[in-house]
Image: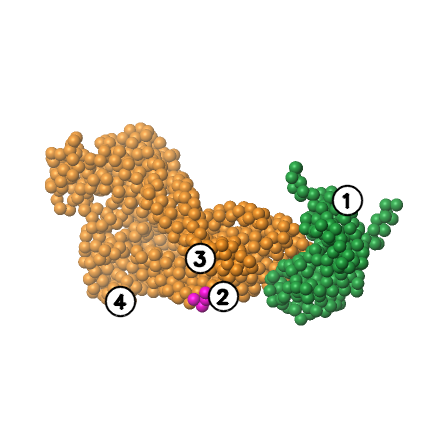
Chain colours: A orange, B green
Amino acid sequence: MFKTTFRNLASHKVRFFLTCIAIVLGVGLLTGTHVLTDTVRATFDDLFDEVSGGVDLTVRAETAFENNAYGSDRELVDASIVDTVRAVDSVEVAEGSVEGYAEMVGRDGVAIQPPGAPALGWSWSDVPEFNAFRIRDGRPPRDSDEVVVDAGTADNHGLGVGERIDILLTGTRQSFEIVGVARFGEADNLAGATVALFDPATAVGILTAGAGYSSVQVKGVEGGGLAELQDDVDAVLPDNLETVTAAQLAEETASAVTDGFGIFETGLLVFAGVSLFVAGFIIFNTFSMVVAQRSREIGVLRAIGAGRRQIMVSVIVEAVVMAVLGAGLGVLFGLAVAHALLAVFDLIGISLPSTDLRLEPGTVYVGFGLALVVTVLAAVVPARRAAKVSPIAAMTGDAATGERSPATRYAFGAGAGAVGAGLVAAGLVAGGDWALSAVGGGAVLVFLAVAALSPLVARPVAGVLGRPIALLRGVPGHLAKENAQRDPRRTAATAAGLVVGIALVTFASVFAQSLKASTTGAIRSAVRSDFVVVGQSVGVTFGDDVTDRIRDTAAVEGVVPLRGRPEGALWRLDGVEKSVVGLPADGDAAIDLDVVEGSFGALTDTGVLVHTGEAEAHGWSVGETIPMEFAKTGIVDFTVVGIYSEDVGDMVGDYVVSTSAYDANFSDPRNLGIFFSSRAGSGARGDTGATLAAFPNVRLLTLDEFVDEMGSRLDQMLGLVFVLLTLAIVIATLGIVTTLALAVFERTREIGLMRAVGMGRRQVRAMVRWEAVIVAVYGAVLGVATGLVLSWAAVTAMESSGLTRLVVPFGLVGGVVVVAAVAGVVAAVLPARRAARLDVLESVAAV
Amino acid sequence: MTATLAEDRVSTDAASVTRLVKTYGRGDSTVPALADVTLRIERGRFTAIMGPSGSGKSTLLHCMAGLDSATSGEVRIGDEDVTRMSEAERTRLRRDRLGFVFQAYNLVPTLTAEENILLPSRLARRRPDPGFYREVVSTLGIADRLGHRPAQMSGGQQQRVAMARALVGRPAVVFADEPTGALDSRSSGAVLGFLVHAVHEMGQTIVMVTHDPLAASRADRVVFLADGYIVGDMFDPTPDRILDTMKSLGG
């Protein structure tokens, strides 16, 4: 008896570790993400405090809303404002500063385009409070021929003081001498952006074409108050200008930088959610099995007078302990995650000014809170079952753990499934802020439904999957099949984690492939041009100087620039953010959007083309007036001049204005692409190729290449999703390990018996291994099925948004099933070894 | 000379134990379970091993069956030295040359009666003699239970299935560890009747550990154990004689 107790304790450690690990991962990722954003925020706060001492202001043009990560969407400040501000008594120093587009060209002649960050040009300031850059080598820029570059760019591209560098500016390309290399505070660069610093006079000329300053920096007199300074300055400013404090600016910059991590953050949080969800299944399963195994012990407790409530509480308390320890480890793991992420960012060139991790109390509360909620919810049902064990169980050892009525569970499953699928579909169709919550919540319901209904099919499906194994693998295979079919509820619960991971993988890949096929198909049918000029790397825009040069080439015709921003040129409709692109009125020669009402050619300075989906949603027809609110210009009334039905995805989106209207309302007249065709019989590619040699920031693609590239962007997105979901499969595998280990423990006597009558160790291992494979493949099959249903629902729901094709990547789906089988083999290694090493005599004698 | 001795053993002994010692624990806290046991089990005989609790009777059975290892001494099944075997060889020995009937929980719950009976031969990927299989099954009266799982059978039926499993491979020895311990007297009688039948009609060798004098009295010979020593050896036993011996052992 003592022997079993000790064995129980020993198995506790492993089980505890395996059960906790999913919580640790979930809480860890959650914490890591929060720590990362808090750290970035704190870092910028510190930096600006340090630089400005907290007593300075920035004067700039007001915007209707923040729509651009780096704040370039503002009207310029007239140069005369600097003098006006200087005249205020409480102002000690005021200086105009400018920022704009400046893209450096590397030694190899290729433009240096930071991935996911802008190429910036700034004016240098000698007032240290106004300038977060500190010279590392050389000296500040003093001449129109001189530039200082950020240390990150200099180091990555082998640039040094004394060298000459070409810089692409709006509409031109100029050569400068590098006179200095500067660091941004403690960091080598500003969150991945490249920065070229010019002397103020030069900067005004090349970055804003002499039209004014981006902002005016103000430092108050010694001993003056900040509020007082702000009041004084505000008093002399015209209405369209505002003042912001250094603290506010720090906050804005930090937000901009953290927004840049948005994709990472969302991905990590989604995965943290998935992993906590899977943890719930694992905990549920573990506790269910442990309660069943302990029924004799619980029976004894009941027999000597323990109440049902006490039994239930004792199980819940165990869950709470597990949650607290798991969350504690998770928070520590989260710090490591944040550290690793910062290191990764640094590695890919996004350096941050400091790396002192910030762990806010809120982060810890959220981590512990979620872990507790998940664990306790998962343990409630097993705890109730434990409470129902009768004192008779002490004598018989039989646990009366039957559930009240499977009908309730099936009803719940059916209901949750229907509601969940509806929510997923609704979320996908509606878009907007709550879409992610709706899709996520819906998916959770769908998975709960699958878990509730899964025991219905577990026995027959496991039978079908096990049959070939039983035929090929003899007795161990046969026993594996029988064991997998033995308790359908357990098999279903064990596979549940895998179902979640694999359903998500399937959903993501089918959805992405369908989106890719639909979008690339639409682009191919819409684009009439032979060639497209795009930025050097994905999502980088370029100026109209390229357009002009292509127009000048004799061999081409139908040159159409597509204005826009990679992250979307944002405007607002009644406070809801939308994005827009700019095309000339003759743009349909290059991009045929299939205008079903009105005409493309009617695109005037206040005309807008709207996609049918949006037009229907708002009940618009041609002639309708839409109040479009831009950050730079405020509300401008546009008239719907046409409604189009072609869906080319993000390339065009739902709204098109004229090129001139775009330039009037956004401060960067830059292009995502230039479309053109060759004149009959001309070697247009050769001609334009030569022309474009002067522009190292762009590439010339044929239509086919362009379509491929648009498609491959989705593949990259899918890559990230895959990495995260693979981790979900790993966690689910841990769940299988736990269940198998418990099952082996439960079947000790049986295994001993089989060993006694001549089953070899290899045969025992094979039996456990094949059971794991059957359960894992069962999970994969159910996961693939769930994923297919979800993606079918999604694609059907989004048909009007341009998702016209359902593409199932069969190879990949088959691969997933194979991966699951392998995961089963891996999961079985330890439990199988344990089973094979059981001492025959002790096992036969085990109670 | 040695060869003749070995041949002699092969011809008459199904199993033999020579100077077998088995101690549990280490150092000062060793507990001797078997002190010095020498025993020959003759072919075609039904041998019962009796003794009070802690006498070492189960340990002796386990060592003979290759389920437990000896501290010193020799165990032979036929001409094979069990004490020199690796774990894999002992597994093969159990599968191919021995049969087992335990007190309870003899059957794999996921398998039907028939699958349980054929388990050792299927583990060895052998086909048992179908005629003998039918004979065993009909003798034991379980022909109509073959498709049932253990949970659907009574304790007596389960023990009969276990016996069928033990007998169907025509093992050198069947070891039965308190085979009637968990049964009512009627089922016990039936089970013992089948054991006797197997020995006398089929020529099977059976070694049974029991503490029940009535059960032991059905055997051809009873070996008495106390404190790890053989203290008595009785042929053609009766319940009364067995009880007397047990009383003298203080059991």
Q: Are labels 3 and 1 on one chain?
A: no
Rate crowding at label 4 as few (under 14), some (14 to 19) or many (20 or more) other CA atoms within 10 Å. some
Q: What range is drawn magenta here?
A: A404-408
Q: Are marks 3 and 4 in contact (CB under 8 Å)?
A: no
Q: Is residue A838 visible?
A: yes
Return the x and y of residue B59 as percentages of the image width and height: 70, 49
Viewer-nearest of discs 3 and 2: 3
Question: Callout 4: helix, strand or loop?
Answer: strand
Q: Looking at the image, is mark 2 or mark 1 nearer the viewer? A: 1
Say what secondary structure mark 3 lies in.
helix
Left or right of A87, for residue B182: right
Say which mark, if any, is on residue A308. Answer: 3
- In what quadrant of the picture does the C terminus of chain A appear? bottom right
**Secondary structure beneath label 2:** helix
Q: Nearer the viewer, mark 4 or mark 2?
A: 2
Question: Is A556 positioned to the left or the right of A812 in the image?
Answer: left
